[in-house]
Each structure stands twice: as structure tokens, then as C-alpha cells.
Image (cartoon, rainbow, N blue to C red):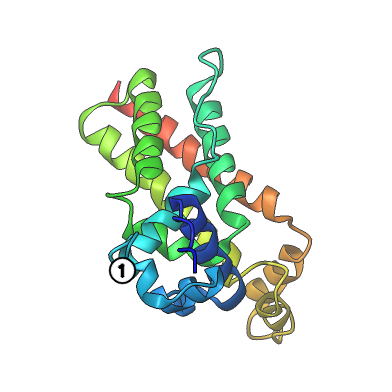
């Protein structure tokens, strides 16, 4: 009987991503990925050491298609907006992987690449020292947080409807805001929120100068 053909890292990543997309992040295991590939569980250990390495393969796979190139003719805030939106689109297609972005922020090559590019943009804009640290962390916090909220608490979800139905006598601002929120698109929410962050970073830069 012929031996099964060797697996490529992209095949493992695609199988792991299929499991996550279908059954959630908690379902990811060496057994579930091997089953997705039609292999025995032990055969998967020929290629990866365990779940942690599978997770990193998934993160690398999802972000590998993100284009981190930007035009030097664009303003620094436009460059960051473009990169952030590209990351959002890639991750939004597989929202269950959002927790893995933080877990593997130090060992994923595409995440390191995104950090280097964004820090380069901030440096060219004039950020340095503590201001660059704070600006970079603020940018990362917004992107990761926005992705989590988009997945776990979308404005189009039942949670917004529940808030909109609250009695206005007790929760006038919450209820009214929730009613308005139902008409806000995902793209507008992300972009407008990021604009606020970038304007704050711009103010920080002016104060530093």
C-alpha cells in the first residue's frame, strides 16, 4: 500500500482553518486537523509539534495574503488606515482566529512584518521614543479590539436590538445610541473609529514637537 503523500504547511494551515471556521477555535486539535485531512492523528505530528504550532500556521496563513506595501506619496495616517483595513478584511473572513493574533504576536512572521511596517510609518512621520511606543500600542489596541467587537458584539446583532428596546426613561442615551447604531456598517464603524485614534496620535505628535 503506497504511503500518503507528504503534507505542505499550507495544507495543514488550510485544514486547521477549516476546522476553526466550521466548529470554532476550541475545536482545533491535532486530531481534528488530521481528520480534516483524512489522516491518522499521529501522522500530523510528523509535521507539527502540537496545537500551538498549528495556531501559528493558521495566523501566518490568514495574514500571508495581506499587502503591507503603501505608497510613500500618501500621508502617514492614510498609510496606516490602508494597512489596518487590509488586516481587518483578512481577519474578518475568519473571525474566530482573533484571539490568536495576540497569542502569536511575537512568533508570527506576518505579524512581525506588520509591526515593522507600521513602526516605520510612525518613525517617518516623526514619532520617536515614548511617543512612538504609545502610538503603536494605541493603534494595535484599536485594531485588535475592533476586530473582537466586530465578531462578538456586532452592531447588527441581537445585543444592539436588546439595548435599543430598553426603556428610555431609565436609559435614554443607551437606547437612542443603540437605535442609531443599527444603521452603521461594519466598514464605517471601523474606519471612523480608526480616524479618531489617528487624530489623537496626530495631536500627540504635535505636542511632542
Q: Is residue 137 left or right of residue 74?
A: left
- Tell me which residue sits at (51%, 76%) in the image: 35
Q: Name the residue under label 1.
A: 50
- Tell me which residue sits at (26%, 38%) in the image: 133
Count neighbours of disc 1 (C-alpha within 10 A) and say few if under 14, some if 14 to 19, many if 20 or more: few
Q: x and y percent of residue 115 in the render?
A: 36, 38
User: Given the current orientation, which residue lies at the most extreme left position?
Assistant: 129
Q: In this view, does 172 lie to the left or right of 63?
A: right
User: Given the current orientation, which residue lies at the most extreme top position?
Assistant: 73
User: Given the current orientation, which residue lies at the most extreme right position?
Assistant: 183
Q: Helix, strand, or loop for circle 1?
A: loop
| Above or below for 23 versus 138 | below
Residue nearer the viewer, 7 or 207:
7
Q: x and y percent of residue 65 in the render?
A: 55, 40
Q: In this view, does 38 lie to the left or right of 29?
A: right
Residue nearer the viewer, 5 or 163:
5
Residue nearer the viewer, 177 or 4:
4
Amino acid at each position: 500500500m503506497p504511503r500518503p503523500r507528504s503534507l505542505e504547511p499550507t495544507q495543514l494551515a488550510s485544514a486547521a482553518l477549516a476546522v476553526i471556521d466550521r466548529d470554532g477555535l476550541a475545536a482545533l486539535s491535532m486530531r481534528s486537523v488530521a481528520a480534516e485531512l483524512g489522516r491518522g492523528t499521529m501522522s500530523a505530528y510528523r509535521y507539527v509539534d502540537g496545537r500551538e504550532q498549528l495556531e501559528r500556521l493558521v495566523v501566518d496563513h490568514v495574514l500571508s495574503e495581506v499587502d503591507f506595501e503603501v505608497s510613500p506619496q500618501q500621508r502617514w495616517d492614510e498609510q496606516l488606515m490602508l494597512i489596518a483595513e487590509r488586516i481587518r478584511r483578512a481577519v474578518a473572513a475568519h473571525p474566530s482566529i482573533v484571539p490568536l493574533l495576540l497569542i502569536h504576536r511575537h512568533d508570527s512572521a506576518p505579524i512581525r512584518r506588520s509591526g515593522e511596517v507600521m513602526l516605520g510609518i510612525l518613525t517617518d512621520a516623526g514619532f520617536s521614543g515614548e511617543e512612538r511606543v504609545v502610538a503603536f500600542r494605541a493603534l494595535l489596541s484599536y485594531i485588535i479590539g475592533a476586530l473582537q467587537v466586530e465578531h462578538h458584539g456586532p452592531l447588527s446583532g441581537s445585543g444592539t436590538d436588546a439595548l435599543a428596546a430598553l426603556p428610555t426613561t431609565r436609559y435614554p442615551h443607551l437606547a437612542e445610541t443603540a437605535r442609531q447604531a443599527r444603521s452603521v456598517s461594519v466598514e464605517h464603524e471601523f474606519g471612523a473609529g480608526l480616524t479618531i485614534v489617528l487624530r489623537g496620535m496626530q495631536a500627540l505628535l504635535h505636542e511632542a514637537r
